[in-house]
Every structure is written in structure tokens, then in C-alpha cells.
Amino acid sequence: MTLPLQARVVIVGGGIAGCSTAYHLAKLGITDVLLLEQGKLTSGTTWHAAGLVGQMRPNRTMTGMSRYGIELYATLEQETGLATGWKQCGSVNVASTPERMKVLKKQLALARSFGVECQEVSPREAGELYPVMRTDDLQGALWLPGDGKANPADLCMSLAKGARLRGVTIVEDTEVTGVLSGNGRVRGVRTAQGDVACEALVNCGGQWARQFGALAGVNVPLYSAEHFYVVTGKIDGVHPMLPVMRDPDGFIYYKEEVGGLVMGGFEPKAKPWKMDPIPSTFQFQLLDEDWDQFEVLMTNAMHRTPCLQTAEIKMLLNGPESFTPDGNFILGEAPELRNYFVCAGFNSAGIANSGGAGRLIAEWIAGGEPSTDVWDVDIRRFGAFTGNRKALAERTGETLGLHYAMRWPRQELETARPLRTSPLYDMLAAKGAEFGSKNGWERANYFRRGGAMRPPHTLGAPGWLPWMVEEQEATREAVAIFDQTSFAKLLLQGRDALAVLQRLCANEMDAPVHKMVYTPMLNARGGIESDLTVTRLAADRFLVVTGSAQATRDADWITRNIREDEHALLTDVSALTCVLSVMGPKSRELLARVSPDDLSPGALKFSWTKEIDLGHARVRAARMSYVGGPGFELYVPVEMTRHVYLALQEAGAGLGLRDAGYYAIDALRIEQGRRAWGAELGPDESPWEAGLAFSVRMDKPSEFTGREALLAARAQPLRKKLVTLVLQDARAYAWGGESILLDGATAGEISSAGFSPLANACVALGYVRGAGAQSVHSGTDAAIDLWGKRVAVKLYDSWPPR
Ligand SMILES: Cc1cc2nc3c(=O)[nH]c(=O)nc-3n(C[C@H](O)[C@H](O)[C@H](O)COP(=O)(O)OP(=O)(O)OC[C@H]3O[C@@H](n4cnc5c(N)ncnc54)[C@H](O)[C@@H]3O)c2cc1C
């Protein structure tokens, strides 16, 4: 077939992601779409997927996305006339350890909160649902009647037909070999059959998406792993409506197929497929069997379903699938090139997720921005460094197994670390720092004391709690030093820098030089795209400081909103400056010992900064505190950070100075009701809902993005409201993600939780949704579901009550 000379959107890749994207673009009325596939439709990874389709995801938005996919799969055949193999057979998820059962109970509470039908069932009932399973060693199970299975290739072809029926052109046997761009935008694609001009491109290249992205300088950090399942002959008692079964403690899953079982899983140590580049001729192909790699899954399966000990094994399928550094897929417009979209990296859940992901990316293309909060899967969560192939291969060996591994609260990934480190890293490590990683940055979470080892993971009160409490007490009663170097720092400069900020920020940004302003940046829906502090360094120069995870995202948001005729340039200067936060009532006394400059409240008011001498260094001191209470953030040139830290340590003798970490920061800020972007704040939360009205200046002279939406929302009742929750049982330890119950009914979820010495209990933040948002007042009685048990809480508008 000859290619058209142009199309509005070109989709690269004819797997389920590409076909779903095409289908949804067409459904939104964008029909001038050309899908190019180097082989045949489904010939990449889609054709050999097992086809399990589950609804539950870790949060509300992503669960909504999966549920939409299931609704679509259930009705697609009627629409297109092409069978999808969809069967709503339900799924049984079993637990064989008490801890796993607690995790399932948390999922049950969340499922109810998200509107997913879900029941707890006994081992006996699980056995009735899944008769070929051994149940004598089970703790219990969850039953999700709405889950199901599909035939991946048929489903993909049905989506393709739906797209074609609406006008999409699909061309097979056409490899896209290059991307044409100009002026920072996609202009077209190159193929052996000629160039095709386009306004937008969607990289749905599956495991090829990274190498295809690299053709245009776009980072798509994914890497393939060998991925396995066995297919058996017919087994007695196995029928087409037998539920899907997952035994995460055994790392395995099952699905019925032609009267037999498909059994696969997620072995704890996976095998990256070190093929670089992946040839374009790898179509309808598989990799060699590897029974050694599969052994752990087979052993566990023969235990769980003894019928496998004698069943005929027809084949051990080994097909490569792409995995990402955090186990979530990759969606969105690439920060490197405008109108270059990505929908790839599905971590062995592409059949389940593509229905929803295709719709999200289509909405993003059509609307110019995402329709909802997609941060979990947003391509901008990855910095350029994540494209390193050695790191990707090592991480893929880890993330595949995370699917079914017991995930403990605050568990850190271990591969490809340490990578980004502050100059204090080795010194803090020698002092017992236990590090976590955020956007590649190593950050001290807490400091072990007395040469103790890292305490084991737990669902209850953690072993590090006493150490963290000491760090909290030092912050509240003496002085603590936090290395917050991982903060993202963006320098915005130019004649129109102020105008850009005034338009993007809801607060008044025309502040005097040296003043720091806390502000949200809003989208047109009035949702919070970011919250950040901006220090005016000069009339035309501003230092934007934002969360460690959001460097790429916020830089992208700001730069894409600089108009062509505006003179403003943004530079990521994160790695030039370290941040040492000196917090606590004795912080001023400590700084007075190392600096001759006047830091008294009269000389440096709250939210102001000034350049000071510190030891032999020059640093910028800001009177600012995220943890609450008195304190200073010190912005220190990287090369002087060691000197400054040592000077502070030496001067701190006798003041009770303590090194403290991010767990203390988090618990302290929650105690003070400080919000965090990604937890309490996001594109779906307005400043009204988040209780950030103080940071919005509706009356500022210049118009700002989101103002209209805020004005409209102000006239309406709140859809949800952020509250502080104080647990009434001092022994109960909450971690975040628990559901909130108001009068016994689910009303929302906890966004962050931490221990508060002030309350002598855990304190949490969370949104109460719907009617409850109106009725909550300070002191309202409520409950949370903590690992399946009700724990009484009191709700407050703000806490501690003032
Ligand atoms: C063993 C196994 C079991 C699985 N089980 C399940 C399951 O039970 N449930 C589930 O949800 N998921 C499952 N998956 C995962 C699922 O198969 C994938 O996530 C999904 O198929 C990915 O779809 P995709 O469209 O992103 O990729 P693909 O299907 O690989 O499609 C990408 C396409 O892009 C094409 N392409 C690449 N580069 C170019 C180019 N330059 N020009 C033109 N075309 C190009 C390729 O040829 C390919 O056809 C499983 C995967 C495996 C390996």
C-alpha cells in the first residue's frame, strides 16, 4: 500500500497499545490517523500474552483506568463484530502468609473505596471457586468477580477494526526508520516507502520504544526481560469459566485455556534480555526455553495445584516483554520534543492496561494536556539519566519480580544505586545513614544508632521508629541538620521571566529581590501542577525550588508555557547547589556560631533570604521551614558543602545538634499539616480542596492559569477536602493508602502518614470525598481500615488545634 504524504497523527507500533491509541483517537474524532507497523499487527509482544485482565491498581485514578478497559473489552465485540475472547470469569487472589493476608485486606478496603466489587473469602471458599487448588496452607483470599481474561491477539485485532471503521489507516510491513523534526516539534516520520508529514507522533513501539525513542533524542527508559509461562494439556475440573488465580506468595498466576492451564509468574530475580538493538525482524518470535529460570515458579505451582505434577506440559513459552525502572508504564508527551507522545513499557500488564492507557494518551493528544492525574505513569517522572542501559538491565532484573513479591511499606529498590549523591554521602553513610532513592538521588531516610543493623521490614511499628523520634525531638527541641540536596532547582532568567511566573503561578510573584514566595502552579482545570518556592535573585532572575521527583516535569511545564515572543530561559541547576536545612529552636544560635551575619528575626524575616558568610564559605540562607518551627535552609555551592557541613557540626557541640533524615522530615511536615506534591497535591486537586487558599492571590493584577476554574469552583461545594487524621490508638501504625471510614462508609484514603511525638500516635493527611467533605469539622469521629482492622481516628481541619 502506498503511504499517504501526511496524516494528523502517526502511531508507530501495531500492538495492543498502538491499536488502542488509534481506536481512542478516532473515537475522539481524530480520524486522520496513520498506524505503521514494521511487521504484522500483534507480532511484537501482544500475540503471546497470557491475557489476564484485572481491575485493581494501587490508586483511584489508575484503577478507574483499568476498570474502563474492562468495560470496553466487554462490549467491543458488539461494536466491531470481531471476537475478543473476553470472559468475565472473576479472579481469586490467595494469601499464604499472615502478612500477605493483611495486604489483601488493605486491597479489599481500597477496592470498596474505588468502587470495585471485591469480597474476602475463606480458604474453603477459595477452594470452591478454584477446585484444582490446594488450600490447606492458605490464610484466606480475595474474590473479584469483575476481573476476567481475553485473547490478546483477538482483542488487539478488534481494537484495530474499531479504529479502521472510524477512518484510521493501518499499514503493516512498514518500519519507521526516522523522525523528522523542526523548531523543537515533530514534523513527520521516515520510512523506506517515503516520508509522512504529521502533527503528532505516538511511540507505541513496545520493547522497541527505547531504541525508537533514541532516534529522536527521546528517553524512553524500558528494557526487556525474558518472561515465561507454561501451557498444559486438558486437566479435569478446568473449564472456560474457571477464574483467574493469583498466588503472589508463590509468584505465580493461572488462567484456563482450551481446558488446560496457562501458568506463569514473576520470579524474584528476573532475566533481562540483553539484546541491543532488538532487531525489527523479531516478529511472532519467541526465545529459548529456560527451565532453570522457570524452576522456582514450577516448584511453587506443583505445590499450589498438584494436578500440574502429572499434567501434560505442552510448552514453556518464553517471550520478551519490556519493564521500566519503577514498574509503571510510560505515558505522555516527551519533554525533549513537542508533540512526540509515548505509550509503552507495560511491565507485563499491557493487555489489562492498554484500553485505559490508549484513552488517556488520546485525550492528552486531543486536549493538549492530560485529562486527569497521570503522575504514576507520566514520562516526565524519568530524568535523562534513566536511559542508561546497564542500569536499566539491572533494574529490570529487579522490577519484574516486584509484581508479586511482598511489598513492604517504605521498601526501596536496590539495583543501580547509589547513583546521584550529595558531597556528604560518604560522611553520612559512615554516621549510620540509611538511604532511600528519589529520582536517582540518595537521601538519608534515618540514622541508625550504636552500630545497629537496618531493622527488618514490617507492617507494624518499624524498628527505626525510636531513632526517627530522636531526630524529630532534636528538630522540635534543639537543632537538626537535614541534607536536602536532592531538591530540584531551576533557574528562570530573562526579560520576561517575571511575566512567565505571574502567568503560571497563583501567588503574587512580583516580590522584592531576596524574597522567597511559596506558590502553586495550576492547570486550566485549577488543579495543582506543582507547588514550589521561588526566590527572586534579581529583577530578571528567579530560583525555582521544587520536589526532588519533579525536576523534569516542572521544567517541562514551565518551558512549554514560555511563549515564542517571550524572553525567558529555564536551566536545571539542581546539581550546582546543595541544600542543608538547619531546623529547630537552636538553629539561630548554631548559625550565629559560624556566621558573623545578623540572622535575627528583624534582620531576616520569615520567607526572606540573604547571602551570608558561613565558615569560610558564602551561602544563601533562607528563613523557611517545611517541617514547621524555626529554621533555615542553606543554599550552598556544591564544592563548599563539605566545608559548611563540617563547620556546622563542629559548632553544634553542646547544642544537641543531630543529623536527621527524610522519614523525620515527612513525619514532621505531616504533623504540621504541610502538603506534599504527589501525595496531597496533584493535577486533580484544587488549592481550595487542598487548603492552600493562603497561597492564591485571586486579586493579583495579572491573569494566571487556572484562575477561571478556581473562581467557578469557589461557587460550588467542595468535591473533597483535605483533613488531618489523628489515630486514637497509640500502638496502631499507619503508612498511607489506608481507606477512611465516615459513619462506617468509605469516604476517602490517607495520602501520607507518620508518627507524631506531639500526638503520641500516628497523624495522617487524607481527602474526605463527597458529602463527607461538607460535614467534617474539627474533632469529627471517624475510622480507618488498617490492614483489615478498624482504628478510631479524629478528623481536623487543621492540627495541632491552634
Ligand atoms: C509471557 C507474557 C505474558 C503476559 N501476560 C499478560 C497478561 O496476562 N496480562 C497483561 O495485561 N499483559 C500480559 N503481558 C504483557 C503484554 O503482552 C504486553 O504488555 C503488551 O502486549 C504490550 O503491548 P505493546 O503494544 O506495548 O507492545 P507490542 O505488542 O510489542 O507492540 C509494539 C509494536 O511496535 C512495533 N514497532 C516497534 N518499532 C517499530 C518501528 N520503528 N516501526 C514500526 N513498528 C514498530 C513492533 O513490531 C510491535 O508490533 C504478557 C507478556 C508476556 C511476554
Image (tube, rainbow, N blue to C red):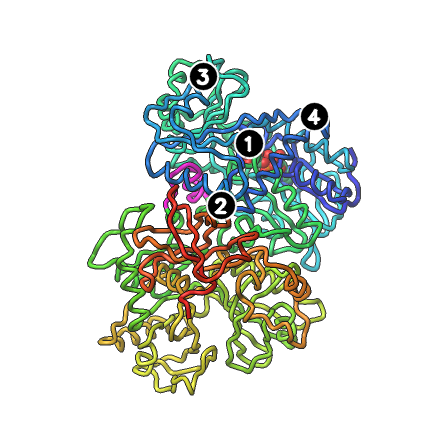
Indicate which label's residue lies in the foreground, 1 or 4: 1
Residue 666 visible in the picture: yes
Q: Position of residue 306 (x, y in %)?
A: 37, 18
Distance (Cα) linking label 3 and label 4? 30 Å
Magenta-colored stretch includes residue 402: yes
User: Where does label 1 land, which residue?
Assistant: 146
Name which of mark 1 and mark 3 comes first in the sequence.
Answer: 1
Q: Residues within 10 Å of mark 2 (few under 14, many from 20)?
A: some
Does 710 sit left or right of 682 as displayed? right
Q: Kindly identify the residue that appears in the image at 61 percent across and 51 percent down.
A: 372
Kind of element beneath mark 3: strand
> Given the image, on which type of amino acid does mark 3 rest?
Ile
Indicate which label's residue lies in the foreground, 2 or 1: 2
Tell me the tag on residue 82. Answer: 4
Q: Position of residue 776 (x, y in %)?
A: 50, 58
Indicate which label's residue lies in the foreground, 1 or 3: 1
Tell me the tag on residue 745. Answer: 2
Kind of element beneath mark 1: loop
Kind of element beneath mark 2: strand
Distance (Cα) linking label 1 and label 3? 29 Å
Name which of mark 3 and mark 4 comes first in the sequence.
Answer: 4
Kind of element beneath mark 4: loop
> Given the image, on which type of amino acid does mark 1 rest?
Gly
Q: Residues within 10 Å of mark 3 (few under 14, many from 20)?
A: some
Q: Position of residue 663 (x, y in %)?
A: 36, 59
> Magenta stretch?
393-408
